[in-house]
Image (cartoon, grey):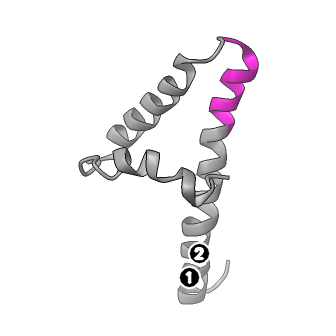
Amino acid sequence: MPYIKPQERPQYDVVLDKLPEIQNKGHLEYCIFKVVKKFMETREKRYGNYHDCVYGVEHCSDEYRRRFLDKREDQAIQENGDV
């Protein structure tokens, strides 16, 4: 999950809050890739660390889907009826 202790967040938020508007999906993917690449700069190049990168991104994706997409799907069912 993308949750860390509140006292650990400012070190990242100070940088992330300065990002310009991310223009489109390609730019978003570029930013995510650069963060993962930065994560790996200080780690041994082995399967477990690469695996951590992939699953970190996937877990964030899962949480975003749970919090936003699933709610939107439920809303669409309410508005349009179930199939």
Q: State how many labels appear.
A: 2
Q: Quadrant of the C terminus?
A: bottom right
Indicate the amino acid at tag 2.
Answer: Lys
In the image, the segment drawn in magenta is 45-55
Residue drawn 66% across the image and 22% down it: 50
Task: Give the residue at x 31% y 47%.
Answer: 24
CB of mark 2 within 8 Å of CB of mark 1?
yes
* Badge 2 element: helix
Task: Look at mark 2 in the image and give the residue it sits on.
Answer: 71
Question: Which numbered circle lies on residue 59?
Answer: none
**Identity of the amino acid at label 1?**
Gln
Q: Is residue 50 magenta?
A: yes
Residue 64 coordinates in the image, percent (x, y): 57, 59
Residue 3 lies in the magenta stretch: no
Residue topped by disc 1: 75
- Is the residue 77 above or below the residue 8 in the image? below
Q: In this view, does 10 lie above or below 69?
A: above
Relative image position of residue 59 (x, y in whole percent): 66, 47
- Lateral position of residue 11 relative to residue 51, left or right: left
Residue 9 in the figure: left or right of residue 82 = left
- The residue sitting at the right extreme is 48
Q: Main secondary structure of the magenta part?
A: helix
